Image (spheres, grey):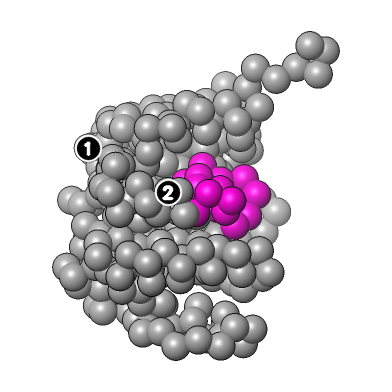
């Protein structure tokens, strides 16, 4: 078995997780390879020798899993290494709120053992792709999102207008601060905070959620995942912001966007005792009432 290990930051919470990973790897003869920048961070506090990778090109079919240590944001970054390789991601939660990184740091050894025994399932997650009418160099390398593609105003307090077309048919002109196009995975993120619905991970749908719309009767809409979405943005400023998960770039109003499902999925490792519905109840405190 061979595992890639990725994280974004080092803090003391990681020491026990890393110790458990090293212990398990040694006991089960598992080869572990660290992302280079993460390796350099943790080596400032812990001195050990390990192999490293630095690019998605280094992750070939010899890898069985990628272990993401952090929160949901870390998994979104980890997905940029996995891409269409089919390597599943195991999320260890070293942060607070985690829908994707659901493995508690206190039970790392238990769940690593389940992975080694192959006692898990794969949750296939929809990925969105972004195309622009005018090429943007910084989007050529990573033009996909696991959570959402969002459009936001830039350098202005005024609203922007986002003309939206579904499979070539006009839907609406959103007068708003922005617009979110979310996958089921991203439905518990930015879209949820703007009033969007929660979708189960295997739902074959997307959500279009306006951000602070001018018209109060404008509501989020759920559409089939195979819908092609075209967007034309206008406003008082010549530029607007586009983000793919946490990656942000500036685009001019003349540049039209096309958002549609990518032909590959991202695989998340899940376990029978860590269902999405359990996570919803625990993270959103559904059913909790201080009066009871």
Please tell me whether residue 98 belongs to the stretch shown in magenta: yes
With respect to residue 161, does 133 lie above or below? below
Image-quadrant location for residue 181: top left
What mark, if any, has residue 45 been given in the picture? none
Q: Nearer the viewer, residue 12 or 179?
A: 12
Q: Is residue 12 left or right of residue 258?
A: right
Which residue ends up furthest to the right in the rendered image? 291
Q: Quadrant of the C terminus?
A: top right
With respect to residue 252, does 200 lie above or below? above
> Image point 41% across, 41% down: which residue?
185
Circles 2 and 1: CB distance less than 8 Å?
A: no
> Image point 42% across, 64% down: which residue?
24
Q: CA distance from mark 2 to mark 1?
A: 34 Å
Q: Nearer the viewer, residue 165 or 10?
A: 10
> Image point 57% across, 80% down: which residue?
42
Q: Earlier in the sequence, mark 2 or mark 1?
A: 2
Q: Which residue is mark 1?
A: 226
Q: Quadrant of the N terminus?
A: bottom left
* Residue 55, x across and y down, in percent: 33, 79
Q: How many marks?
A: 2
2 vs 1, front mark: 2
SS at badge 1: loop
* Residue 241, x across and y down, in percent: 52, 61
Q: Which residue is mark 2?
A: 111
Residue 179 in sight from this viewpoint: no
The residue carrying pointer 2 sits among few (fewer than 14), some (14 to 19) or many (20 or more) residues within 10 Å by Cα, namely: some
Q: Nearer the viewer, residue 168 or 52?
A: 52
Please tell me whether residue 176 belongs to the stretch shown in magenta: no
Magenta stretch bounds: 93-108
């Amino acid at each position: 078995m061979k595992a890639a290990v990725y994280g974004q930051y080092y803090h003391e919470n990681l020491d026990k997780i890393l110790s458990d990973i090293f212990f398990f790897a040694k006991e089960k003869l598992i080869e572990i390879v660290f992302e280079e920048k993460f390796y350099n961070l943790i080596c400032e506090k812990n001195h050990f020798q390990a192999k490293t990778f630095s690019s998605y090109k280094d992750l070939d079919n010899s890898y069985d899993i990628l272990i993401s240590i952090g929160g949901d944001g870390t998994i979104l970054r980890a997905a940029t290494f996995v891409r269409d390789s089919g390597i599943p991601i195991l999320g260890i939660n070293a942060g607070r709120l985690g829908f994707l990184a659901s493995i508690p740091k206190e039970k790392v050894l238990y769940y690593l053992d389940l992975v080694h025994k192959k006692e898990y399932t794969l949750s296939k997650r929809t990925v969105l792709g972004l195309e622009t009418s005018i090429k943007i160099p910084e989007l050529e390398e990573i033009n996909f999102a696991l959570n959402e593609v969002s459009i936001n105003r830039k350098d202005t307090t005024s609203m922007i207008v986002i003309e939206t077309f579904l499979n070539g048919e006009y839907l609406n002109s959103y007068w708003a601060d922005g617009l979110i196009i979310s996958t089921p995975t991203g439905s518990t993120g930015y879209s949820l905070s703007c009033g969007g619905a929660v979708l189960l991970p295997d739902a074959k749908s997307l959500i279009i959620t306006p951000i602070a719309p001018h018209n109060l009767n404008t509501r989020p809409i759920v559409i089939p995942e195979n819908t092609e979405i075209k967007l034309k943005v206008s406003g008082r400023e010549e530029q607007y912001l586009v983000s793919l998960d946490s990656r942000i770039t500036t685009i001019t109003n003349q540049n039209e966007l096309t958002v549609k499902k990518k032909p590959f999925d991202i695989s998340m490792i899940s376990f029978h005792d860590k269902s999405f519905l359990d996570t919803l109840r625990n993270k959103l405190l559904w059913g909790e009432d201080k009066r009871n």
